[in-house]
Image: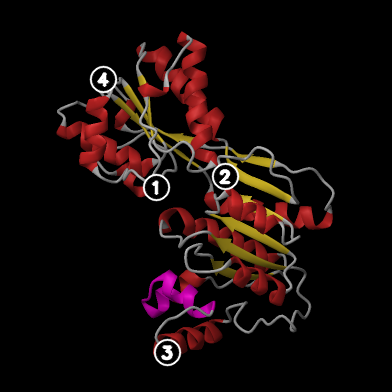
Amino acid sequence: MRKAITIKEIAEQLNLSRNTVSKALNGQYVPEKTRELVFSKAKELGYKSLNSTPSARGSKKYRFILISGKPLNNMNYFVPLIKGIENSCYEDNCELFQYVYNKSRTPFRGLSDYVTELDVDGIIAIECFDKDFIERLLGLGKPVCFIDFTASYDNINGNYDIICANDRHTIFTAVLHLIKKYGITRLTFVGDRMHCMSFRERYLGMLNAIIRRRGTHGRYEDILLSDEGFNYGDVNAVKTKILQLKYRPECFVCCNDFVARIVCTALKELNVAIPESALVIGFDDVPEAHNPAPSITTFSIDKEFMGRETIRTLINRIEMPNCPTRTIHISTAVVAGDSTCR
């Protein structure tokens, strides 16, 4: 079977960014010469969605639209995920369209009209964490598969499923292991636990492990500021918050690898040795975690498999529309780094 051509491959052949190619193929603004180059190369390579129109479904089994709540800039995370989605669509003879929704610039009606014009059978939602947007999206009456979800996930009814990593159990197991191994008692979570469901689950995993071993943990012991008002990428800001804690943590459990790297830099500037004086845990297994001095203990998920599972789950929901909403957890694997190895 011929391998599906991806946006990444078109971008590599033209020496363009994946974002530029995606914009050109999805009707967003790029210079006209760039658009012509992209369409010419896509046609040459046989890109599957190039000439798809609402009236030209042909023999395609299903038609899906991938909606992202913001540009997918973390390429190391999203490229294999999108690859899994695209390849699974190709193998299952499904069409795939993409749409980036900007709440501040695009009225929801524009998205609604686009979904109607395409006559899609199902929706894939990535980086869509706003509860109001999720409820409006479900109001379109299409089956939806969310990759991660809002942290305020209680009482949301609709025809949808959720795909995510096994976040809570992963962090619970790791933190419990470190508590038992090193006898640590002072732990701090760093990150906006209400940014998305996965961050909330990671926070709860840490809490469950602490409660299992010593009984209590107060929010004042964590750095949980909303990322709408606090820049977790600012080393000085993070360093200030660490200094304001009532005690010096023995272990920092970070919402992801990006924040974990910032915490490592802040601790270095505070002359706190890692891992001798403080342990650091990240999540997602992106390249930032593997930089030396120190490498960060993180958790890897098969992102391409997650993309494929998303399509399988969405097809299953289309064919069994009355099944209950499901949350499907994909297992993770620990990637041990220097940040927890004394």
Tell whether 16 sits left or right of 95.
left
Q: Which residue is mark 4?
A: 248
- In space, the residues marked 4 and 1 are separated at their CA atoms by 26 Å
Most common SS among magenta residues? helix
The percent coordinates of residue 239 (x first, y second) are: 22, 34
**What is the crowding at mark 3: few (fewer than 14 residues within 10 Å), some, or many (at least 20)?**
few
Q: Which quadrant holds the N terminus?
A: bottom right
Q: Which residue is mark 2?
A: 150
Type of amino acid under label 2 = Thr
| Residue 190 highlighted magenta (yes or no) | no
- Residue at 23% of width from left, 20% of height from top? 277
- In space, the residues marked 4 and 3 are separated at their CA atoms by 56 Å
Disc number placed over residue 337 in the picture, else none: none
Q: Is residue 113 visible?
A: yes
Pick whichever of labels 4 and 1 is earlier in the sequence.
1
CB under 8 Å between discs 3 and 1:
no
In the image, which is nearer the foreground, mark 2 or mark 3? 2
Pick whichever of labels 3 and 1 is earlier in the sequence.
3
The percent coordinates of residue 183 (x first, y second) are: 36, 11
Q: Which quadrant holds the C terminus?
A: top left
Pick whichever of labels 2 and 1 is earlier in the sequence.
2
**Label 1: which secondary element:** loop
Type of amino acid under label 3 = Glu
Q: Which residue is mark 3?
A: 32
Type of amino acid under label 4 = Arg
- Residue at 84% of width from left, 52% of height from top? 320
